Amino acid sequence: MQKAILVDRINIGIYGRTNTGKSTIMNLLTNQNSSIVDDTPGTTSDIVRVLYEIHDFGPVRIFDTPGLDEYTQVGFKRKEKALLNFKECDLILLVINPNNKNLKVENEIMSLAKQYQKQLIIVFNWFKNQIQNDYDLNKNVEFILENLFDAKAHNHLIIDASEKESSRKLVEAIKQFYKKEEKKIDILPFVKPYSFVALNIPIDEETPERRLLRPQNVVLDYLLRRMVPFAGYRMDLQKARSQIKEIQEEEKNNYLAFIEELNGTSMGLQLVITDSQAIDIVDKWTPREIPITTFSITMINYQSNGHLKKFIEGLNVLKRLKKHDKVLIAEACNHDRKCDDIGTKQIPRRLTQKLGFELEFKFVFGREFFSKELLDDCKLIIHCGGCMVDSQKIQARILTAEENLIPITNYGLVLSYIEGEKALNRVLEPWLKQLG
Ligand code: SF4
Protein backbone atom coordinates (compact mmCIF):
# COMPACT_ATOMS: atom_id res chain seq x y z
CA MET A 1 0.00 0.00 0.00
CA GLN A 2 1.23 3.49 -0.84
CA LYS A 3 2.59 5.30 2.21
CA ALA A 4 2.36 8.98 3.05
CA ILE A 5 5.57 11.00 3.09
CA LEU A 6 5.89 12.38 6.59
CA VAL A 7 8.65 14.97 6.31
CA ASP A 8 7.32 17.20 3.56
CA ARG A 9 9.97 19.88 4.08
CA ILE A 10 13.54 19.54 5.17
CA ASN A 11 14.42 21.94 7.97
CA ILE A 12 17.76 23.70 7.51
CA GLY A 13 19.10 25.74 10.44
CA ILE A 14 21.87 28.33 10.02
CA TYR A 15 23.87 28.50 13.24
CA GLY A 16 27.04 30.15 14.51
CA ARG A 17 28.24 33.14 16.47
CA THR A 18 27.25 36.75 15.75
CA ASN A 19 28.72 38.53 12.72
CA THR A 20 29.75 35.43 10.81
CA GLY A 21 27.41 36.22 7.90
CA LYS A 22 24.54 33.88 8.76
CA SER A 23 21.91 36.31 7.51
CA THR A 24 23.85 36.96 4.30
CA ILE A 25 23.85 33.20 3.77
CA MET A 26 20.11 33.04 4.46
CA ASN A 27 19.54 35.75 1.82
CA LEU A 28 21.85 34.01 -0.64
CA LEU A 29 20.01 30.73 -0.21
CA THR A 30 16.54 32.19 -0.49
CA ASN A 31 17.32 34.72 -3.26
CA GLN A 32 15.63 37.49 -1.31
CA ASN A 33 16.25 39.81 1.60
CA SER A 34 14.73 37.47 4.16
CA SER A 35 17.00 38.64 6.98
CA ILE A 36 18.35 42.08 7.79
CA VAL A 37 22.09 42.20 7.21
CA ASP A 38 24.24 44.62 9.20
CA ASP A 39 27.70 44.70 10.79
CA THR A 40 26.14 45.39 14.20
CA PRO A 41 26.49 42.23 16.31
CA GLY A 42 23.13 40.67 17.20
CA THR A 43 21.19 42.11 14.25
CA THR A 44 19.19 38.87 13.99
CA SER A 45 17.35 39.05 17.28
CA ASP A 46 14.83 36.28 16.63
CA ILE A 47 14.63 33.24 14.39
CA VAL A 48 13.75 34.14 10.81
CA ARG A 49 11.91 31.36 9.00
CA VAL A 50 11.53 31.11 5.22
CA LEU A 51 9.87 28.44 3.08
CA TYR A 52 11.76 27.78 -0.12
CA GLU A 53 12.10 25.24 -2.93
CA ILE A 54 15.51 23.95 -3.99
CA HIS A 55 15.30 22.48 -7.50
CA ASP A 56 16.14 18.78 -7.74
CA PHE A 57 16.16 18.65 -3.93
CA GLY A 58 12.71 19.61 -2.70
CA PRO A 59 10.91 22.02 -0.40
CA VAL A 60 12.87 23.32 2.56
CA ARG A 61 12.24 25.46 5.60
CA ILE A 62 15.28 27.63 6.38
CA PHE A 63 15.92 29.14 9.81
CA ASP A 64 18.31 32.05 10.31
CA THR A 65 19.15 32.09 14.01
CA PRO A 66 20.67 34.69 16.36
CA GLY A 67 24.36 34.32 17.23
CA LEU A 68 24.96 32.09 20.23
CA ASP A 69 27.72 34.23 21.75
CA GLU A 70 25.60 37.02 23.21
CA TYR A 71 26.20 36.84 26.94
CA THR A 72 23.42 39.16 28.11
CA GLN A 73 20.08 38.27 29.70
CA VAL A 74 18.27 38.72 26.40
CA GLY A 75 21.11 36.91 24.64
CA PHE A 76 20.57 33.84 26.87
CA LYS A 77 16.86 33.90 26.06
CA ARG A 78 17.61 34.05 22.33
CA LYS A 79 20.07 31.22 22.75
CA GLU A 80 17.53 29.04 24.54
CA LYS A 81 15.08 29.55 21.69
CA ALA A 82 17.69 28.94 19.03
CA LEU A 83 18.75 25.71 20.73
CA LEU A 84 15.15 24.51 21.03
CA ASN A 85 14.84 25.20 17.31
CA PHE A 86 18.04 23.19 16.75
CA LYS A 87 16.15 19.99 17.61
CA GLU A 88 13.71 20.69 14.77
CA CYS A 89 16.43 20.90 12.13
CA ASP A 90 17.31 18.08 9.77
CA LEU A 91 20.43 19.84 8.55
CA ILE A 92 22.63 22.40 10.33
CA LEU A 93 24.80 24.88 8.46
CA LEU A 94 27.47 25.90 10.97
CA VAL A 95 28.87 29.22 9.76
CA ILE A 96 32.41 30.04 10.88
CA ASN A 97 34.60 33.03 10.22
CA PRO A 98 37.98 31.39 9.38
CA ASN A 99 39.72 34.19 11.26
CA ASN A 100 38.16 32.99 14.48
CA LYS A 101 40.41 31.23 16.95
CA ASN A 102 38.02 30.82 19.85
CA LEU A 103 35.85 27.77 19.11
CA LYS A 104 33.69 27.68 22.24
CA VAL A 105 30.39 28.37 20.45
CA GLU A 106 31.30 26.20 17.47
CA ASN A 107 32.24 23.26 19.69
CA GLU A 108 28.95 23.60 21.52
CA ILE A 109 27.07 23.39 18.22
CA MET A 110 29.14 20.39 17.12
CA SER A 111 28.43 18.59 20.42
CA LEU A 112 24.71 19.24 20.03
CA ALA A 113 24.81 17.93 16.47
CA LYS A 114 26.36 14.73 17.80
CA GLN A 115 23.92 14.49 20.70
CA TYR A 116 20.85 14.94 18.49
CA GLN A 117 22.37 13.09 15.52
CA LYS A 118 22.00 16.01 13.17
CA GLN A 119 23.53 16.21 9.73
CA LEU A 120 25.81 19.24 9.56
CA ILE A 121 27.87 21.13 7.01
CA ILE A 122 30.62 23.49 8.15
CA VAL A 123 30.48 26.68 6.08
CA PHE A 124 33.62 28.84 6.27
CA ASN A 125 32.63 32.34 5.30
CA TRP A 126 35.70 34.11 4.06
CA PHE A 127 35.87 37.80 4.97
CA LYS A 128 38.45 39.13 2.52
CA ASN A 129 39.11 42.27 4.53
CA GLN A 130 40.34 40.04 7.39
CA ILE A 131 42.25 37.33 5.49
CA GLN A 132 43.74 38.49 2.24
CA ASN A 133 45.24 35.43 0.57
CA ASP A 134 44.46 31.75 -0.05
CA TYR A 135 47.47 30.56 1.91
CA ASP A 136 46.35 32.25 5.15
CA LEU A 137 42.78 31.20 4.55
CA ASN A 138 43.68 27.52 4.14
CA LYS A 139 45.99 27.64 7.16
CA ASN A 140 43.18 29.06 9.31
CA VAL A 141 40.64 26.56 8.00
CA GLU A 142 43.05 23.71 8.74
CA PHE A 143 43.58 25.00 12.27
CA ILE A 144 39.86 25.11 12.91
CA LEU A 145 39.21 21.68 11.44
CA GLU A 146 41.93 20.24 13.67
CA ASN A 147 40.58 21.88 16.81
CA LEU A 148 36.86 21.63 16.22
CA PHE A 149 35.08 18.79 18.02
CA ASP A 150 34.01 15.97 15.67
CA ALA A 151 34.92 18.02 12.58
CA LYS A 152 35.99 14.91 10.67
CA ALA A 153 32.46 13.54 10.83
CA HIS A 154 31.15 16.40 8.69
CA ASN A 155 31.74 17.99 5.30
CA HIS A 156 32.84 21.57 4.86
CA LEU A 157 33.07 24.23 2.19
CA ILE A 158 34.58 27.69 1.87
CA ILE A 159 32.59 30.54 0.38
CA ASP A 160 32.65 34.29 0.26
CA ALA A 161 29.05 35.10 1.10
CA SER A 162 29.42 38.62 -0.28
CA GLU A 163 29.68 37.10 -3.79
CA LYS A 164 26.44 36.16 -5.52
CA GLU A 165 27.83 32.95 -7.07
CA SER A 166 28.35 31.54 -3.57
CA SER A 167 24.65 30.79 -3.61
CA ARG A 168 25.20 28.01 -6.20
CA LYS A 169 28.10 26.59 -4.18
CA LEU A 170 25.93 26.43 -1.08
CA VAL A 171 22.99 24.82 -2.87
CA GLU A 172 25.26 22.25 -4.52
CA ALA A 173 26.84 21.42 -1.14
CA ILE A 174 23.41 20.90 0.40
CA LYS A 175 22.38 18.64 -2.48
CA GLN A 176 25.63 16.71 -2.38
CA PHE A 177 26.11 16.27 1.36
CA TYR A 178 22.60 15.99 2.79
CA LYS A 179 21.49 12.37 3.01
CA LYS A 180 17.75 12.21 2.64
CA GLU A 181 16.16 9.76 5.00
CA GLU A 182 13.12 7.76 4.03
CA LYS A 183 10.73 8.73 6.77
CA LYS A 184 7.39 7.28 5.75
CA ILE A 185 4.45 6.38 7.86
CA ASP A 186 0.95 5.16 7.21
CA ILE A 187 -1.79 7.39 8.58
CA LEU A 188 -4.25 4.54 9.16
CA PRO A 189 -2.18 1.38 8.66
CA PHE A 190 -4.99 -0.97 9.66
CA VAL A 191 -7.60 0.35 7.22
CA LYS A 192 -8.43 -1.84 4.22
CA PRO A 193 -9.82 -0.77 0.84
CA TYR A 194 -13.43 -1.44 -0.16
CA SER A 195 -14.97 -1.34 3.31
CA PHE A 196 -16.61 1.74 4.83
CA VAL A 197 -15.05 4.13 7.33
CA ALA A 198 -17.52 6.40 9.14
CA LEU A 199 -16.32 9.88 10.09
CA ASN A 200 -18.05 11.64 12.95
CA ILE A 201 -17.53 15.39 12.56
CA PRO A 202 -19.62 17.52 14.92
CA ILE A 203 -19.77 21.14 13.79
CA ASP A 204 -19.86 23.88 16.40
CA GLU A 205 -19.34 27.64 16.60
CA GLU A 206 -15.56 27.24 16.31
CA THR A 207 -15.75 25.21 13.10
CA PRO A 208 -14.61 27.44 10.22
CA GLU A 209 -16.98 27.95 7.26
CA ARG A 210 -16.32 26.24 3.92
CA ARG A 211 -13.50 24.00 5.10
CA LEU A 212 -12.87 21.04 7.29
CA LEU A 213 -10.20 20.92 9.99
CA ARG A 214 -6.85 19.62 8.85
CA PRO A 215 -7.01 16.20 10.60
CA GLN A 216 -10.32 15.59 8.84
CA ASN A 217 -8.87 16.66 5.49
CA VAL A 218 -5.78 14.52 5.94
CA VAL A 219 -7.89 11.47 6.73
CA LEU A 220 -10.27 12.11 3.79
CA ASP A 221 -7.36 12.47 1.40
CA TYR A 222 -5.82 9.26 2.73
CA LEU A 223 -9.04 7.29 2.34
CA LEU A 224 -9.78 8.60 -1.16
CA ARG A 225 -6.33 7.74 -2.43
CA ARG A 226 -6.65 4.19 -1.15
CA MET A 227 -10.12 3.47 -2.49
CA VAL A 228 -11.58 3.31 1.00
CA PRO A 229 -15.24 4.34 0.90
CA PHE A 230 -16.30 6.70 3.67
CA ALA A 231 -19.35 8.53 4.92
CA GLY A 232 -19.58 11.52 7.22
CA TYR A 233 -21.96 12.11 10.09
CA ARG A 234 -22.47 15.46 11.78
CA MET A 235 -23.31 14.58 15.36
CA ASP A 236 -25.37 17.18 17.16
CA LEU A 237 -23.57 17.20 20.50
CA GLN A 238 -26.13 19.44 22.18
CA LYS A 239 -28.89 16.99 21.38
CA ALA A 240 -26.68 13.99 22.17
CA ARG A 241 -26.00 15.40 25.66
CA SER A 242 -29.48 16.79 26.22
CA GLN A 243 -31.11 16.17 29.59
CA ILE A 244 -34.40 15.73 27.76
CA LYS A 245 -34.65 12.05 27.00
CA GLU A 246 -36.66 12.39 23.76
CA ILE A 247 -34.15 14.84 22.25
CA GLN A 248 -31.24 12.60 23.14
CA GLU A 249 -33.08 9.54 21.78
CA GLU A 250 -33.73 11.32 18.50
CA GLU A 251 -30.00 12.00 17.99
CA LYS A 252 -29.10 8.48 19.06
CA ASN A 253 -31.55 6.98 16.57
CA ASN A 254 -30.18 9.15 13.76
CA TYR A 255 -26.63 8.06 14.53
CA LEU A 256 -27.54 4.40 14.85
CA ALA A 257 -29.49 4.48 11.57
CA PHE A 258 -26.38 5.93 9.87
CA ILE A 259 -24.11 3.25 11.36
CA GLU A 260 -26.52 0.40 10.58
CA GLU A 261 -26.97 1.61 7.01
CA LEU A 262 -23.22 1.46 6.38
CA ASN A 263 -22.74 -1.79 8.23
CA GLY A 264 -25.57 -3.38 6.27
CA THR A 265 -23.92 -2.78 2.88
CA SER A 266 -22.00 -5.59 1.17
CA MET A 267 -18.77 -3.69 1.98
CA GLY A 268 -19.59 -3.43 5.65
CA LEU A 269 -18.30 -0.83 8.13
CA GLN A 270 -14.71 -1.34 9.30
CA LEU A 271 -14.11 1.70 11.52
CA VAL A 272 -15.59 4.85 13.05
CA ILE A 273 -13.25 7.84 13.45
CA THR A 274 -14.64 10.53 15.67
CA ASP A 275 -13.77 14.00 16.85
CA SER A 276 -12.25 13.36 20.30
CA GLN A 277 -14.77 15.58 22.08
CA ALA A 278 -17.55 13.14 21.10
CA ILE A 279 -15.79 10.00 22.29
CA ASP A 280 -18.10 9.67 25.31
CA ILE A 281 -21.15 9.40 23.04
CA VAL A 282 -19.58 7.46 20.19
CA ASP A 283 -18.22 4.83 22.59
CA LYS A 284 -21.63 4.33 24.20
CA TRP A 285 -23.72 4.35 21.03
CA THR A 286 -21.56 2.45 18.53
CA PRO A 287 -22.16 -1.33 18.58
CA ARG A 288 -19.23 -3.05 20.37
CA GLU A 289 -18.15 -5.09 17.34
CA ILE A 290 -17.35 -1.92 15.34
CA PRO A 291 -13.87 -0.50 16.06
CA ILE A 292 -13.52 3.19 16.86
CA THR A 293 -10.67 5.66 17.17
CA THR A 294 -10.26 9.45 17.08
CA PHE A 295 -8.85 12.02 14.65
CA SER A 296 -6.57 13.35 17.37
CA ILE A 297 -4.95 9.97 18.09
CA THR A 298 -4.55 9.30 14.36
CA MET A 299 -2.94 12.69 13.86
CA ILE A 300 -0.51 12.58 16.77
CA ASN A 301 0.73 9.15 15.69
CA TYR A 302 1.32 10.49 12.19
CA GLN A 303 2.89 13.79 13.28
CA SER A 304 5.15 12.15 15.85
CA ASN A 305 6.46 9.72 13.25
CA GLY A 306 4.72 6.73 14.81
CA HIS A 307 5.46 7.52 18.47
CA LEU A 308 1.91 6.97 19.71
CA LYS A 309 3.28 4.62 22.37
CA LYS A 310 5.02 7.52 24.15
CA PHE A 311 1.71 9.41 24.32
CA ILE A 312 -0.06 6.34 25.70
CA GLU A 313 2.64 5.91 28.36
CA GLY A 314 2.12 9.54 29.29
CA LEU A 315 -1.37 8.65 30.53
CA ASN A 316 0.13 6.72 33.46
CA VAL A 317 0.91 9.94 35.28
CA LEU A 318 -2.81 10.75 35.53
CA LYS A 319 -3.05 8.17 38.34
CA ARG A 320 -0.32 9.96 40.29
CA LEU A 321 -1.39 13.58 39.87
CA LYS A 322 -2.07 15.55 43.03
CA LYS A 323 -4.17 18.61 43.83
CA HIS A 324 -2.80 21.81 42.20
CA ASP A 325 -0.26 19.95 40.05
CA LYS A 326 0.58 21.91 36.91
CA VAL A 327 -0.58 20.51 33.58
CA LEU A 328 0.38 22.11 30.28
CA ILE A 329 -2.17 21.96 27.48
CA ALA A 330 -0.45 22.41 24.12
CA GLU A 331 -2.51 23.19 21.05
CA ALA A 332 -0.65 23.62 17.79
CA CYS A 333 -3.14 25.96 16.18
CA ASN A 334 -4.12 29.42 17.20
CA HIS A 335 -7.65 30.70 16.78
CA ASP A 336 -10.33 32.68 18.46
CA ARG A 337 -11.65 30.46 21.23
CA LYS A 338 -15.42 30.45 21.54
CA CYS A 339 -18.04 28.29 23.25
CA ASP A 340 -16.94 25.05 24.86
CA ASP A 341 -13.40 24.99 23.46
CA ILE A 342 -11.84 21.53 23.69
CA GLY A 343 -8.37 22.58 24.90
CA THR A 344 -9.14 25.47 27.22
CA LYS A 345 -12.54 24.37 28.54
CA GLN A 346 -13.51 20.75 27.95
CA ILE A 347 -10.27 18.98 28.88
CA PRO A 348 -9.66 21.02 32.08
CA ARG A 349 -13.29 20.58 33.16
CA ARG A 350 -13.61 16.88 32.38
CA LEU A 351 -10.22 16.01 33.84
CA THR A 352 -10.96 17.89 37.05
CA GLN A 353 -14.29 16.04 37.33
CA LYS A 354 -12.61 12.69 36.70
CA LEU A 355 -9.81 13.22 39.24
CA GLY A 356 -11.99 14.93 41.81
CA PHE A 357 -9.55 17.75 42.58
CA GLU A 358 -8.30 21.00 41.06
CA LEU A 359 -5.25 21.14 38.83
CA GLU A 360 -3.39 24.21 37.62
CA PHE A 361 -3.65 24.41 33.85
CA LYS A 362 -1.23 26.32 31.66
CA PHE A 363 -1.78 26.76 27.93
CA VAL A 364 0.44 27.18 24.92
CA PHE A 365 -0.82 27.73 21.39
CA GLY A 366 0.66 27.65 17.91
CA ARG A 367 4.35 27.25 17.20
CA GLU A 368 5.65 28.53 20.52
CA PHE A 369 8.72 26.77 21.90
CA PHE A 370 8.64 24.61 25.00
CA SER A 371 10.90 26.90 27.02
CA LYS A 372 12.17 26.09 30.53
CA GLU A 373 9.89 28.81 31.91
CA LEU A 374 6.84 27.28 30.24
CA LEU A 375 7.62 23.75 31.40
CA ASP A 376 8.62 24.82 34.90
CA ASP A 377 7.14 22.41 37.44
CA CYS A 378 4.73 20.82 34.94
CA LYS A 379 3.73 17.27 35.75
CA LEU A 380 2.14 16.48 32.40
CA ILE A 381 1.79 17.85 28.87
CA ILE A 382 -1.44 17.18 26.99
CA HIS A 383 -0.91 17.80 23.27
CA CYS A 384 -3.48 18.06 20.49
CA GLY A 385 -3.07 16.13 17.23
CA GLY A 386 -0.46 18.71 16.19
CA CYS A 387 -1.57 18.98 12.56
CA MET A 388 -0.68 22.68 12.18
CA VAL A 389 3.02 22.31 12.91
CA ASP A 390 5.57 20.16 11.16
CA SER A 391 6.46 16.69 12.28
CA GLN A 392 9.96 17.85 13.26
CA LYS A 393 8.41 20.24 15.81
CA ILE A 394 6.29 17.51 17.36
CA GLN A 395 9.32 15.24 17.60
CA ALA A 396 11.37 18.09 19.11
CA ARG A 397 8.61 18.68 21.67
CA ILE A 398 8.66 15.01 22.65
CA LEU A 399 12.43 15.24 23.08
CA THR A 400 12.20 18.41 25.18
CA ALA A 401 9.50 16.80 27.35
CA GLU A 402 11.74 13.76 27.87
CA GLU A 403 14.76 15.90 28.70
CA ASN A 404 12.67 17.66 31.34
CA LEU A 405 11.25 14.33 32.60
CA ILE A 406 7.69 15.43 31.85
CA PRO A 407 5.33 12.79 30.44
CA ILE A 408 3.44 13.82 27.33
CA THR A 409 0.05 12.60 26.18
CA ASN A 410 -2.69 13.62 23.76
CA TYR A 411 -6.22 15.11 23.66
CA GLY A 412 -7.88 12.01 22.18
CA LEU A 413 -6.15 9.70 24.64
CA VAL A 414 -7.04 11.82 27.68
CA LEU A 415 -10.67 12.21 26.68
CA SER A 416 -10.92 8.44 26.12
CA TYR A 417 -9.18 7.78 29.48
CA ILE A 418 -11.72 10.01 31.17
CA GLU A 419 -14.49 7.80 29.77
CA GLY A 420 -12.88 4.77 31.41
CA GLU A 421 -10.60 1.85 30.67
CA LYS A 422 -12.99 0.20 28.23
CA ALA A 423 -13.27 3.30 26.05
CA LEU A 424 -9.52 3.82 26.10
CA ASN A 425 -8.80 0.20 25.16
CA ARG A 426 -11.36 0.45 22.42
CA VAL A 427 -9.84 3.50 20.70
CA LEU A 428 -6.40 1.95 20.99
CA GLU A 429 -7.31 -1.51 19.77
CA PRO A 430 -6.95 -0.72 16.04
CA TRP A 431 -3.41 0.55 16.75
CA LEU A 432 -2.21 -2.34 18.91
CA LYS A 433 -0.56 -4.34 16.11
CA GLN A 434 1.46 -1.30 15.04
CA LEU A 435 2.53 -0.52 18.60
CA GLY A 436 4.07 -3.97 19.02
S1 SF4 B 1 -3.41 21.87 15.44
FE1 SF4 B 1 -4.29 20.54 16.96
S2 SF4 B 1 -6.18 21.52 17.67
FE2 SF4 B 1 -5.55 22.52 15.75
S3 SF4 B 1 -6.72 21.42 14.19
FE3 SF4 B 1 -4.71 20.44 14.35
S4 SF4 B 1 -4.99 18.78 15.78
FE4 SF4 B 1 -6.75 20.15 16.01
Image (tube, rainbow, N blue to C red):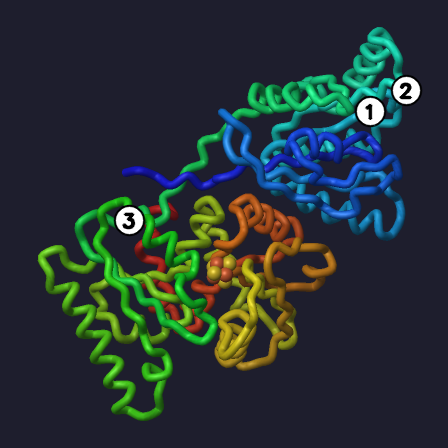
| Pointer 1 with pointer 2, Cβ within 8 A | yes
Of labels 2 and 3, earlier in sequence is 2
| Pointer 1 with pointer 3, Cβ within 8 A | no
Name the element at disc 1.
Answer: loop
Residue at x 83% of width, y 42% of height: 43
Number of disc labels: 3
* Residue topped by disc 3: 190
Q: CA distance from mark 1 to mark 3?
A: 52 Å
Residue at x 37% of width, y 62% of height: 294
Please provide percent x and percent y for residue 354.
48, 78
Q: Where residue 130 is drawn, which disc sits there?
A: 2
Q: Is residue 419 shown left or right of residue 334? A: left
Among the 4 quarters of the image, the one containing residue 102: top right
Q: Is residue 426 shown left or right of residue 297? A: left
Q: Is residue 209 shown left or right of residue 368? A: left
Q: CA distance from mark 2 to mark 3?
A: 61 Å
Please provide percent x and percent y for residue 148.
78, 22
Q: CA distance from mark 1 to mark 2?
A: 9 Å
At label 2, the amino acid type is: Gln
| Pointer 2 with pointer 3, Cβ within 8 A | no
Question: How many residues crowd around disc 2 within 10 Å: few (fewer than 14), some, or many (20 or more)?
Answer: few
**Residue nearest the observer in this picture, 78 or 48:** 48
